[in-house]
Image (tube, rainbow, N blue to C red):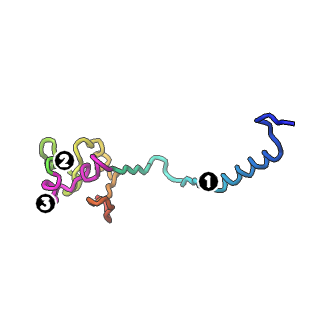
Amino acid sequence: MTHAPHHFTRRRLLALTGATVATAALAPQISFADGPKDRPLILILLRGGLDSQALFPLYTDPNYRSLRGPLALAPPGSYGGLLDLDGRFGLHPVAEPLLAYWQAGQMAVPIIGPDGVIQPGFI
């Protein structure tokens, strides 16, 4: 006697049940903290052309202009220049919409070294 391809047997039901239980036991556990719903944490990892060195340059570094060459932006207050964040770091002018978050204390920027390693501290 042959069975149709979609015919369930007790053996198949037990195998599927076992597989479902095993999958549920091995699946990653997800939990949600009970907290304010209007305060998301957004992490943006930048690599390549618009990395943290380009978006948040340390414009007071004496080597900034020589290391960035023609990519170095004018200092804050200059036409097309950086937007000052704290007297040392600037914000690229194309990211001006982020400035309001910075000024409201709703944004932090980790300090990333040229080797891509996150340095201790934030701007």
| Residue that badge 1 annotates | 27
Task: From the top left corner, tell me how far across and down residue 102 is, in percent.
Answer: 30, 50
Q: Residue furthest front?
A: 1
On the picture, is 66 further left or further right than 114?
left
| Residue that badge 2 annotates | 82
Q: Residues within 10 Å of mark 3 (few under 14, many from 20)?
A: few
Dot 3 amino acid type: Pro
Q: Which mark is residue 62?
A: 3
Q: Residues within 10 Å of mark 2 (few under 14, many from 20)?
A: many
For residue 79, what is the image quadrant?
top left
For residue 110, what is the image quadrant?
bottom left
Q: CA distance from mark 2 to mark 1?
A: 47 Å
Quadrant containing the N terminus in the rendered view: top right
Q: Residues within 10 Å of mark 1 (few under 14, many from 20)?
A: few
Task: From the top left corner, tell me how far across and down residue 59 is, in percent.
Answer: 17, 55
Task: From the top left corner, tell me how far across and down residue 65 is, in percent.
Answer: 13, 54
